[in-house]
Image (spheres, rainbow, N blue to C red):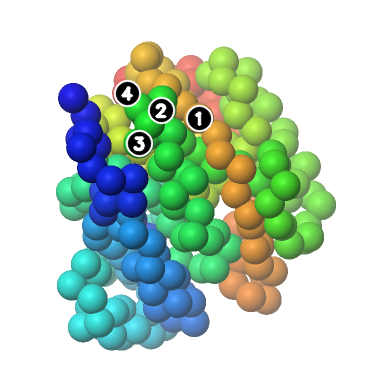
Amino acid sequence: MTDFDNKPADAACASVVIPAYNEEATVCAIVRRALAQPEVQEIIVVDDGSDDSTWDALQLMLAEDFRVKAIRHPQNSGKGAALRTGFARATAPIVIVQDADLEYNPAEYSALIKPILENKADVVFGTRFLGAKAHRVLYYWHFVGNKIVTTLSNICTNLNLTDVEVGYKVFRREVLQKVRLCEDRFGFELEITAKVARLGGVRLYEVPISYEGRTYAEGKKIVWQDGIAALWYIIKYNFFSRAA
């Protein structure tokens, strides 16, 4: 028997973990969109040392809905560090990673968690490169870089993912509990992929998602140096750091 037996398909069963750094303009909007999804049991927002009004905005959300929890890092440590903090406090059987901007649409939670609810998957990655979902057209070299990183990661993990750097990643909570995460910043994406692949017996699905990418002027944070660092993370977590 699983955690989902005898529950209706739209029952609240998911913890949404949102790392946020200087996202005062969007954090309330994304939290409200997530709260509107019937699958959401709780939302854990980790303010990763923001120096704008992100924390003040979160106080409004705490008063607005009891399902919202907020944690504040005293200084900026990175996406991976914020996710570790959030994962440790998640209580629902499914954990969804949600960015604090508006690039990913919470209305797609139902599609993302469906393979888990149907007991077909233990981990689900979104993908921006399959299906007919809408995508904002932006940076060509980001697309090329992502393809290169995904291909190299696949060579090392023996997975056939199409979008390893995607922000939407969904897990059975017990899978996350088997993995010891170390990476503080954007290396989380490649670290979790390598370690999930190494667990053995973990069923991984991809689900097509839409993507409303933003420009640097609109607050996009990833830069070309992160692409170079991604090559190191692939080597590190597939060859030098073999423990889950």
The total number of labels drawn is: 4
Q: Where is residue 110 in the image (x, y as percent from the top left)?
A: 44, 49
Q: Please tell me which residue is depicted at 52% across the width and 50% down the height of the picture.
A: 167
Q: Distance between the residues labelled 3 and 4?
A: 25 Å
Q: Name the residue under label 1.
A: 205
Q: Position of residue 114 (x, y in %)?
A: 43, 39
Q: Please tell me which residue is depicted at 50% across the width and 54% down the height of the picture.
A: 108
Q: Mark 4 points at which residue?
A: 244
Q: Please tell me which residue is depicted at 57% across the width and 15% down the height of the picture.
A: 158
Provide the secondary structure element on which disc 2 rests. Answer: loop
Q: Mark 3 points at which residue?
A: 117
Q: How far apart are marks 1 and 4 (CA)?
A: 20 Å
Provide the secondary structure element on which disc 4 rests. Answer: loop
Q: Where on the picture, by quarter, is residue 93?
A: top left
Q: Quadrant of the C terminus?
A: top left
Give neighbour class at mark 3: few <14, some 14-19, many 20+ (Cα, 10 Å). Answer: many
Q: Distance between the residues labelled 2 and 4?
A: 19 Å
The amino acid at mark 2 is: Ala
Give neighbour class at mark 1: few <14, some 14-19, many 20+ (Cα, 10 Å). Answer: some
Give neighbour class at mark 2: few <14, some 14-19, many 20+ (Cα, 10 Å). Answer: some
Q: Where on the picture, by quarter, is residue 126?
A: top right
Q: Do callouts 2 and 1 mark residues in contact (Cβ within 8 Å)?
A: yes
The first of marks 2 and 4 along the sequence is 2
Q: Mark 2 points at which residue?
A: 121
The amino acid at mark 1 is: Tyr
